[in-house]
């Protein structure tokens, strides 16, 4: 199998039929052996019905599964990657904003030039300013934080070498930062390709203003996790020790001055309260570090999603 297309779908019923026709045109022209994997992310419109119809019309090309509820784009991609079998795994949005015409060039960058990941760059973007301006800022910060020189981290159109896609574990809303996740897994040959971006024809955008806050917080945790990777104790422990040390010294000083020099009334000296506070904060940081270490050890790969239906998948409950 040359290409698996992984397409997350959340209420995109009108877009799916023209999308699949377009994909078929491109794939046939280039004689690719391909599969299209739709992951219906708990749509409340007729998306799943449309996918069922399409899978009957295009025998053996479409595999699909439907989440019982809306888990988010990251979960959809995660599950899609798990069942994909192509040498190259390409993700694209279902809303026709990404052009299937980009597929051959992206495929070649992976197969011929040996890239681990090729990220689309919506250089000319057809989205409202409320989206494009914050996006510029985010991409700037992401470049600084990750050291990956991309203009457009969050482009839905991306191509992955088989291993890259299989080893990325995307969760929460981290689909915005796939290149960073890839880099963490050791896939550092990352290329960028300018892609055509089209205005949305049908339906509405699924990400509101909330994207700003969650995108920013995710970037923060990327920075933190990236910097202290699997050792949160290195961060919390260091600061815990500093605060504990300062607190202990302050209290020791007060105790000594009381006992030896008989200075009275230490309870209304600012240093007394500072010492107590610093000790408590230090303990808190330490405990947070311990807890974080425990969480990391116990977490493993335990994401599970409830799957309502599937097409062409022997055991869709296979977890990973
Ligand atoms: N999507 C999804 N689950 C969600 C939200 C979005 O699977 O909870 C899919 C959606 O159907 C589309 C893609 O993710 O295929 C990108 O979403 P959208 O076009 O709304 O994002 P935008 O282009 O506005 O950034
Ligand atoms: Mg879109």
Image (cartoon, grey):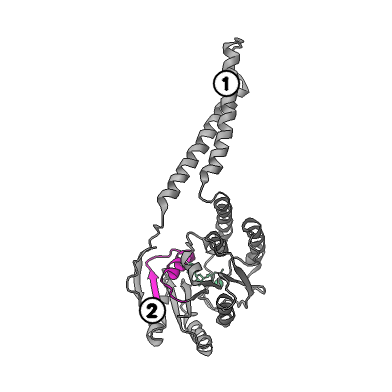
Q: Is residue 52 left or right of residue 282?
A: left
80 up-or-down from 269: above or below? below
Measured as percent of width and height from the top left, residue 107 is found at 55, 78
The residue located at (60%, 20%) in the rendering is 253
Q: How many marks?
A: 2
| Quadrant (top left/top right/bottom left/bottom right) for the C terminus | bottom left
Q: Residues within 10 Å of mark 2 (few under 14, many from 20)?
A: few
Q: Is residue 180 visible?
A: yes
Distance, label 1 to label 2, CA atoms, is 72 Å
Q: Is residue 47 magenta?
A: no
Q: Nearer the viewer, residue 22 or 143?
A: 143
Tell me the quarter of the picture where residue 57 sits.
bottom left
Q: Nearer the viewer, residue 12 or 91?
A: 91
Residue 68's label in the rendered image is: none
**Image location of residue 140, percent across then percent down:** 67, 60
Q: Which residue is mark 2?
A: 49
Dot placed on the residue nearer the N-terminal end, 1 or 2: 2
Q: Quadrant of the N terminus?
A: bottom left
Asked if residue 64 lies in the magenta stretch, the reply is yes
Q: Which residues are magenta?
A: 63-86
Q: Secondary structure at mark 2?
A: helix
């Amino acid at each position: 199998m040359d290409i698996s297309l992984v397409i997350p779908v959340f209420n995109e019923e009108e877009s799916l039929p023209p999308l699949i026709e377009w994909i078929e045109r491109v794939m046939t022209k280039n004689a690719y052996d391909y599969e299209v994997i739709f992951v219906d992310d708990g749509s409340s419109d007729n998306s799943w019905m449309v996918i069922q119809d399409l899978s009957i019309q295009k025998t053996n090309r479409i595999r699909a599964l439907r989440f019982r509820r809306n888990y988010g784009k990251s979960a959809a991609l995660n599950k899609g990657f798990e069942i994909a079998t192509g040498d190259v795994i390409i993700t694209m949005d279902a809303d026709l904003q990404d052009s299937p015409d980009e597929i051959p060039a992206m495929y070649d960058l992976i197969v011929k030039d040996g890239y681990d990941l090729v990220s689309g760059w919506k250089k000319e973007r057809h989205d409202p300013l409320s989206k494009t301006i914050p996006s510029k800022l985010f991409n700037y910060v992401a470049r600084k934080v990750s050291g990956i020189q991309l203009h457009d981290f969050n482009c839905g159109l991306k191509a992955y070498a088989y291993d890259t896609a299989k080893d990325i574990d995307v969760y929460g809303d981290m689909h915005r930062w796939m290149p960073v996740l890839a880099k963490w897994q050791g896939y550092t040959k990352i290329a960028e390709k300018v892609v055509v971006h089209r205005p949305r024809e049908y339906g509405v955008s699924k990400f509101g203003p909330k994207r700003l806050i969650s995108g920013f917080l995710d970037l923060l945790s990327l920075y933190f996790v990236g910097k202290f990777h699997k050792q949160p104790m290195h961060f919390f422990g260091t600061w815990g020790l500093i605060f504990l040390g300062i607190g202990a010294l302050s209290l020791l000083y007060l105790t000594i001055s009381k006992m030896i020099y008989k200075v009275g009334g230490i309870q209304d000296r600012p240093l007394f309260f500072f010492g107590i506070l610093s000790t408590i904060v230090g303990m808190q940081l330490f405990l947070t570090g311990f807890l974080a270490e425990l969480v990391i050890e116990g977490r493993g790969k335990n994401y599970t999603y409830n799957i309502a239906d599937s097409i062409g998948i022997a055991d869709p409950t296979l977890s990973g």
